[in-house]
Image (tube, helix red, strand yellow):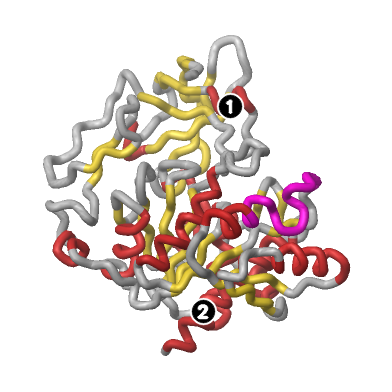
Amino acid sequence: MIRWRNGVVRSLGMAWPGVQEIIVEIPERDDVRALAYTAMVGEPRTGDRVLLNTGALELGLGTGGHAHVVALPDRLPPDPEPGPGHLVKARYTPLQTIVLGADEQDSTWHEALRDADDLDGMPVVLADLHSALPAVVAGIRIGSPQARVAYVMTDGGALPLWFSRSVAGLRDAGWLQGTVTVGQAFGGDLETVTLHTGLLAARHVLGADIAVVTQGPGNLGTGTRWGFSGIACGEAVNAVVILGGRPVGSLRISEADARERHHGVSHHSLTAYGKVAMASADIVVPKLDGEFGEKVAAQAAKLPPRHHVVTAPADGLDDALRACPVRLSTMGRGLDEDYAYFVAAAASGRHASALLNHDS
């Protein structure tokens, strides 16, 4: 349950769109880092009293291990200007937020989306972890540097898109055309009710050539076959095919993860694509050297024959990854510490780019 704390803002830290980091003094303990989502709670200032939720901080989570500002009780933000929008996200929680959905009746885009049901063959890259996003986009840009790439964020991890510094950096660099938050996730350029309308909005509103679908930061896993939030990428394969898109599955691969279930091709990928995805996808397997490469190829070969397993060369991916405008990190490991993971993601992006160029 929630751990509530009162504190006082001692200083301001880093800031990026939608987020202000603060250092908070709490009685009887060391100062803590906290995040304030400014669109929800307002702009904190030094000396403000803050109400915090410290649950994730106390757990010591690697992703999301901060205190979070619930309110600035002595200086509440003004009410938003009256306007359209009745989608409630983070529903029936104390911090539920009301947004304008691209697919709702009051939206400018409602008519365009009301009867839309076709992605026109748009390639859609699907990945388990949010950390794959920058590498996927880096791979796309090898063959299609001008491609309009949209990020569609599902609600398996962080709900506020603002939490992602990777998205902020990719936007600043011009690597993303726009963002869509679906389900209970919020904070994107566009909001939609479902993944299906999110994909259609990426295509028909943002004009995306390629979409990338992952959960927000903060994968949840239990060490069981079915109990992990990234399972949604298998369900996303089905959505993409239903809507006439071309799904490209990015495998979660690691040579550095000490857990056997995640060494080589993660059991997350094998379950999501092998058991949850009922439609066919291109599953991209990077060509890796040595015994590890042989292990990855053998694991991928066990995927069901409904999928098209694509062996992709790794040449050229290193330069693309090192040119990425944001820091590459997964499970606390950087590019050189878990190289195969990022190569696999970039390879899937380059394959999606090849599909786009082939169609054009």
211 or 34: nearer the viewer: 211
Mark 1 and mark 2: Cα distance apart in space: 40 Å
Q: Residue 154 at x, y = what percent?
A: 43, 50
Q: What amino acid is at disc 1?
A: Leu
* Corner quadrant of residue 91: top left
Q: Is residue 250 left or right of residue 213?
A: right
Circle 2: element type: helix
Q: What is the residue that sits farthest to the front in this orientation?
A: 305
Residue lying at 65% horizontally and 69% vertically, measured from the top left: 321
Sort mark 1 into few (<14), some (14-19) or many (20+) by Cα contacts within 10 Å: some
Circle 1: element type: helix
Residue lying at 61% horizontally and 70% vertically, measured from the top left: 305
Q: Residue 151 at x, y = what percent?
A: 43, 61
* Corner quadrant of residue 57: top right
The image shows residue 263, relative to residue 358, as above or below, that is: above
Q: Is residue 5 left or right of residue 225?
A: left
Q: What amino acid is at disc 2?
A: Ser
Residue lying at 41% horizontally and 65% vertically, measured from the top left: 240
Which residues are the magenta region? 258-270
Q: Name the residue under label 2.
A: 353
Check contact, mark 1 vs mark 2: CB within 8 A. Answer: no
The image shows residue 206, relative to residue 155, as above or below, that is: below
Q: Residue 253 at x, y = what percent?
A: 70, 59
Residue lying at 46% horizontally and 19% vertically, measured from the top left: 8
Q: Name the residue under label 1.
A: 57
